[in-house]
Amino acid sequence: MASHISSPAGLRIMHLCDDMERVAGTELTHITAAVRESLEPPKLAIVGRVKAGKSTLVNALIGAKVAPTNDAECTRIVTWYRYGMPDSAELVLRDGTVRPVQFAGALPEDLGVPLDSVSHAVVYLQAAALQDYTLIDTPGLSTTTRENDEATRRAILGGEAARQADAIIYVFKKIEKADDISFMTAFREASGGSADAAEAIGVLSNADRFGAGAWGPRDPISVAAETADQIGTEHAAHVSAVIPIAGRMGEAARTGEVRESDAAVLAGLAHLDDDDARDLEDGILDIPDMDAAAISRVVTMFRGYGLRHGRTIARDGAAALTAWLLERSGMAALEGALRSRYVGSHPHRSIANAVAALADAARTSPHRSALGELLNAARLDPALHVIRELEARERLAARFPDDELLVMLDTLMQQKTDRARLGLGRSASDHDVLVRARECLGDARGRAALAGSPELAEANRVMVRSYQLIADRYHDAANR
């Protein structure tokens, strides 16, 4: 079960749905079913032209090599990667039938049914990232295999079902093409024109191969960043940002592929000048007294950019090399963008939207009085204070987009533990949490009294309540 569905706010909404169904019978089941589904993590679809690096990006985001990557067109069906245990997979056919399928780290080549009968596959993994979002890997657009192109358009733009993705990560290959922009325009139109640039983020793949490549006079990732900025500026109506990504480097970093022995071998090549290192990549240089198989593995893993620029970093070991790969690959920037755009506020926004949807249904119901009482009781529940946090943040952002209170509210909303919300480490005691919560509460109360605008005052009053709720949770434990 996704982390924010099992949060106090998510559980309160689930109980509210149950209570409303008991009062109204089957009258509201279509609404409550949609509300329950809306509490799931956001669904992010990875879309782009064939062989743009989509599956490599999926693996990097998940932190495991589960999506097939090779030189052929290997993503044949739309595949959802969701959090769940044990690791398993199933096929959802276009007629609605669900069939389990063998899964041993990857989907089998033979699915046991014709591909054109499959709507999508669902792979359940115990991957931490998938607690925050579901990833949808798609076949390439503008492919020679018409069925693959149509499967992607049907799944993401709609067809036999509603649009499945909440947002898309569009993977550009080198430069944008007309059909790239055409697809993003269609994505907006699939929601009746309500989707905006915030529902799409761009990725410029193979950033380590731009310009003259890894061995050229300019850093190719810097060249890629310039191209990404240009695409983002020219197509700001379609994407909120375009981030350059070196997918293979990111995959190696996120999947734990780099071993201490790899770092040691790469560091052992630090004495080579760039021309010799390039010869090594081309297979025309032998290094005496070094294991040829180990060198071959390292050259294959760090080909080009990593081989040229990672040799000195590798002297500090696998952890340092992995951190460098994560930063230079652009994965850290992409993950940060996903958190801020889609993950951070999604639990709060889904809770607020759920209450609004249930309230709309209650107003037109013959049972509106009893349903209204249930809704009022839910709104007063401390678990739904998250709605007030979201409302306060949005009002504050509209008026004071650079105010430091936004950072404080984001911390309260996005962090998953009370210790993190208060800026404390995991080893902090319950007493430390109580003391810090009371300090923050006092600070917020003082700011509220001196605030120079209604938005600032309300934001601080909401934070007073947030810190008070944390203090209440730890009062008894800290004083035992």
Image: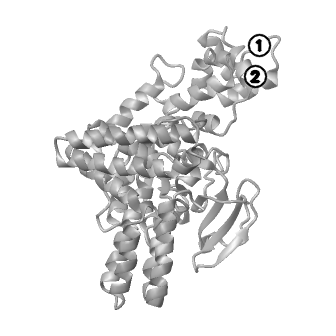
Taking the image as shown, residue 420 lies to the left or right of residue 351, namely right
Q: Label for residue 295? A: 2
Q: Position of residue 323 (x, y in %)?
A: 58, 28
Which residue is located at x 50 percent, y 73 percent? 15
Query: Is residue 376 depicted above or below 381 in this figure?
Result: below
Q: Is the C-beta separation of discs 2 and 1 under 8 Å? A: yes
Query: Could you say whether the residue bearing mark 1 is in a helix, strand or loop?
Result: loop
> Considering depth in this image, is 140 or 167 the residue closer to the camera?
167
The amino acid on which the numbered mark 1 sits, given as a three-letter code, is Ile
- In the picture, residue 407 is in which quadrant? top left
Q: Label for residue 287? A: 1
Query: Could you say whether the residue bearing mark 2 is in a helix, strand or loop?
Result: helix
Q: Position of residue 127 (x, y in %)?
A: 64, 50
Give neighbour class at mark 1: few <14, some 14-19, many 20+ (Cα, 10 Å). Answer: few
Placement of the N terminus among the 4 image quadrants: bottom right
Q: Position of residue 236 (x, y in %)?
A: 29, 46
Q: CA distance from mark 2 to mark 1?
A: 9 Å
Taking the image as shown, residue 79 lies to the left or right of residue 361, namely right
Which residue is located at x 37 percent, y 66 percent? 380
The amino acid on which the numbered mark 2 sits, given as a three-letter code, is Ile
